[in-house]
Amino acid sequence: MSRLRAEHLYKVFGRRSDQAVSRLEAGADRDELRAQGTTAAVIDASFEVEEGQIFVVMGLSGSGKSTLLRMLNGLLEPTSGRVLFDGDDVTALKPRELRAVRARKISMVFQHFALFPHRSVMENAGYGLEVQGVPREEREERATEALHLAGLKGWENSWPDELSGGMQQRVGLARALATDADLLLMDESFSALDPLIRRDMQDQLLELQKTLKKTIVFITHDLNEAMRLGDRIAVMKDGRIVQNGTAEDILVRPATDYVASFIQDVDRSRVLTAGSIMEDTKSDSAAMQSGGELEDASTVTAETPIAELFTPFSNSEDAMIVTDESGTPVGVIDRERLLSALAEEPQVNGIAEPNDTERGPDAAGVTARA
C-alpha cells in the first residue's frame, strides 16, 4: 500500500510558469524555456512510495531531485500536480495545516546537519518535539531513545562542535526519529561525509530500517549509494524521471543510454542477488527437501548478494540452493549460471548496450561526471 504519491508534478521558476507547463505538456523541452528566462526544475514527475520502503531519487547536480523533494513536504509549492500522503493532498493544505504536518508526520534530514551550536546533543535531538509542545520530561526521554538508536549513547550532554561529522549527522537523524514521523525525507544526507563514515551511516540507516520500517525518500547523486539503499530508485535527468525501478531493474535493463552510462562501473556482484539469477525450482522444492541431487548443497537466501557466492563455489560446490525467508527452497544456482550473470550485457529497451565508442562522447562524459 502506498503512503506517498506524487502525481504529475511540475516546478517552473520564472514568469508565466503556468504557460510554461502547458508548453512542456505540448512537447517543448527544457532548453527552449531556458532561452526565454524560465527554468523547468521538475517536469511531470509521478511515483508512489510504499509503506516501509526506501525510495531513492538519484541524479546529477541540476537534475531536479532536491526541488522534487521539497515539493513533497510543501517547502516548495508545485507549479502543477499534487502530492498525496496517506490520501491527503499536501499541496492543498493551508499554511497552518502544512506546518502541523511537517512537525508531526514528515521529518527532514539535511545534508549539512543543521544543528544548533548553542544546544546540547540532547536538546538538538529533541528540538522537533519542542516545536510540537511536548513536555520536557517526555521530550528528553524520546530524544534519548532516538540518540541510542542512532548510536550516540553517552553523548547526550555533549556539544555539536565536540562531535565528528558522522556523529553530527547521527544527531540530525536522531532528531528526525525522535518525532516518530511517518515519512523521512533525506536530502543528500550523507554526501558531506568521507567515504568510510558515509558507508557507516548507510549501514546505520539500513539497520534502523529493519526495526523501524519508516517510509523514506532519500536523495543522492551517488549511484552506488542509491543501489545500496534503495528498495526502488528513480533516476532523474533534466527535470524528468527517466527510469523508476529496483536496483536490479536498472542494472540489468537500463531504460535509456543515459541510465546505461551511469551503471557501466557498478559492481554487478554487489547489486544482483541470488534470487535475481537463480533457476526457479519451486515446483521441485519438495524433492529438494526430501533429498534429491542437491541434498548436500549449501543454501543461501534469495537476498544474498552474488559476490558472497564465490567462496562456496571456489570450495568445490557444484550448485547452491536458494531459500526464501522461511527457509523453503525456491531456486538453484550452478557455476555456469553465476558466471553468465556476471558476463551478461545490460539491455537498453531490449537491445544489448553498445560499448563506449559506439555510444559516443556524450555518454562517456556522463560516466566521468557520475
Image (cartoon, rainbow, N blue to C red):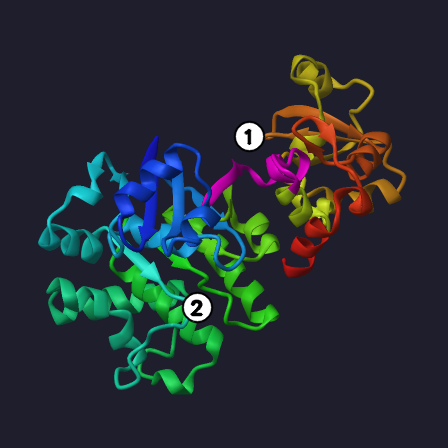
> Horizontal and vertical percent for residue 35?
44, 54
Q: Which residue is mark 2?
A: 151
- Reading the chain from its start, which is encountered first: label 1 or label 2? 2
Q: Characterize the local packing of mark 2: few (<14), some (14-19) or many (20 or more) Cα atoms within 10 angstroms.
A: some
Find numbered disc 1 in the image and state the secondary structure of the residue it sits on: loop
Find numbered disc 2 in the image and state the secondary structure of the residue it sits on: loop
Q: Dividing the image into 4 quarters, which one contains the N terminus?
A: top left
Q: Amino acid at mark 1?
A: Ser
**Residue 5 shows in the view:** no
Q: Nearer the viewer, residue 16 or 341?
A: 16
Q: Which residue is mark 1?
A: 326
Q: Residue at the location (26% across, 43% down)?
A: 18
Q: Residue furthest front?
A: 36
Q: Nearer the viewer, residue 141 or 8?
A: 8
Give the extent of the magenta segment: 239-257
Q: Residue at the location (24% across, 76% down)?
A: 123
> Horizontal and vertical percent for residue 160?
36, 82
Vertical placement of residue 237 versus 204, above or below: above
Count of numbered marks: 2
Q: Which mark is residue 20?
A: none
Query: Could you tell whether 163 is left or right of 301 in the image?
Result: left
Q: CA distance from mark 1 to mark 2?
A: 30 Å
Q: Nearer the viewer, residue 178 or 345?
A: 345
> Horizontal and vertical percent for residue 33?
41, 49
Query: Could you tell whether 333 is left or right of 110 in the image?
Result: right
